[in-house]
Image (cartoon, rainbow, N blue to C red):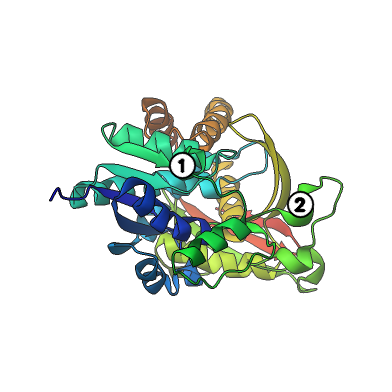
Amino acid sequence: MAKKEKVVLAYSGGLDTTVIIPWLKENYNYDVICVCVDCGQGNELDGLEERARLSGATKLYIEDVTDEFCEEYVLPCVQAHAVYENKYLLGTSMARPVIAKRLVEIARKEGATAICHGATGKGNDQIRFELGIKALAPDLRIIAAWRDPKWTMNSREEEIAYARKHGIHLPFSASNSYSRDRNLWHISHEGLELEDPAAEPNYNKLLALGVSPEKAPAKGEYVTMSFEKGVPVSVNGTKMKLADIIKTLNVLGGKHGIGIIDIVENRVVGMKSRGVYETPGGTILYAAHEQLEELILDRETMRIKKKMGEELAQTVYEGKWFTPLREAICAFITSTQQYVTGPVKFKLYKGNIIKAGEE
């Protein structure tokens, strides 16, 4: 009897990717290896192992890449001050290449012949995953479930019914909720009232990492940070690794209503999409780095660096991390960081980051 081929599934534990497990087995007769890449999603990973097993997966990998994500993907964007369309700090965009990289590594380890993802045909993530996978493993087949002609489910209700038909009872309801993506850097919210550009976001309902500026404390809070050659190394005198700095700043920023944006962005596929993004720690980190850097860089270097930051944001947003262009931009950015060393001080107050001196 011929041995079954293996497929690696990018697994989040949500309804879509959970239903894809029996769908892959039924339509492609694959052994399904689930891979959940942890970029700091927190309690979203709870119960994943049992859910994957009950849905028919052969194996589940939970890969913690939080430090790699922060140090190799987030940091270059901070140093470049890479911002897409003047607002978006690339929270989802920066995470996709490190996820694609780990999917390829597990596929090689398991001898898989294909990688499957559950990104829809309307968004950016399908492009980011597929460009990353093809850059690193052009020989592997990619199955994009939502674009596959064998995929016939078009709603949560149909997915839940499909799961039940296959004897899988899941802790999901068909009720509407925001579509969210979370990692250590940010959380995004789409759907519900945000689909109507005339509607004000229901911040009391949707915020997950902090409070609105109106609900922030009436008294501001001073924070000091230190950098060494463009790398953040401490908060309020305590040295820590980058992931822990981001966690600390997330708490501080969330408390004071920092880093909440409402944006209608231009997706790579040509559609506009409205979302609310919370990036409390990241917004502080960008501001603190820029605050120190303005004391150091000469006028011409700063002018070109601003352009390079915009180019990097565009390149990362479009899923082109594993390209010579991205490497060249980052090489330029790194060269500008040699003297970006010293402390900065600022005050957080009701959604604002107010400069209070730098050395």
Q: Position of residue 93 (x, y in %)?
A: 51, 44
Q: Which residue matches tag 1? A: 150
Q: Identify which amino acid the numbered label 1 is placed on.
A: Lys
Instruction: Determine whether, in the image, residue 282 is placed left or right of residue 104.
Output: right
Q: Nearer the viewer, residue 99 or 60?
A: 60
User: Residue at 49% of width from left, 58% of height from top?
Assistant: 226
- The reply to whether residue 72 is visible in this rendering is no
Q: Identify which amino acid the numbered label 2 is placed on.
A: Leu
Q: Which residue matches tag 2? A: 194
Q: CA distance from mark 2 to mark 1?
A: 31 Å
User: Compared to 23, does 41 lie above or below?
Assistant: below
Q: Nearer the viewer, residue 142 or 127?
A: 142
Instruction: Determine whether, in the image, residue 328 is placed left or right of residue 226.
Output: left
User: Compared to 338, does 326 lie above or below?
Assistant: above
Q: Position of residue 177 (x, y in %)?
A: 68, 62
Regarding mark 1 in the picture, which secondary structure is present there? Answer: loop
User: Residue at 29% of width from left, 50% of height from top?
Assistant: 30
Q: How many marks?
A: 2
Q: Position of residue 99 (x, y in %)?
A: 39, 49
Regarding mark 2 in the picture, which secondary structure is present there? Answer: helix
- The reply to whether residue 318 is visible in this rendering is yes
Question: Badge 2: few (under 14), some or many (20 or more) residues near its Cα, within 10 Å?
Answer: many
Q: Earlier in the sequence, mark 2 or mark 1?
A: 1
Residue 140 is drawn in which quadrant?
Answer: top left
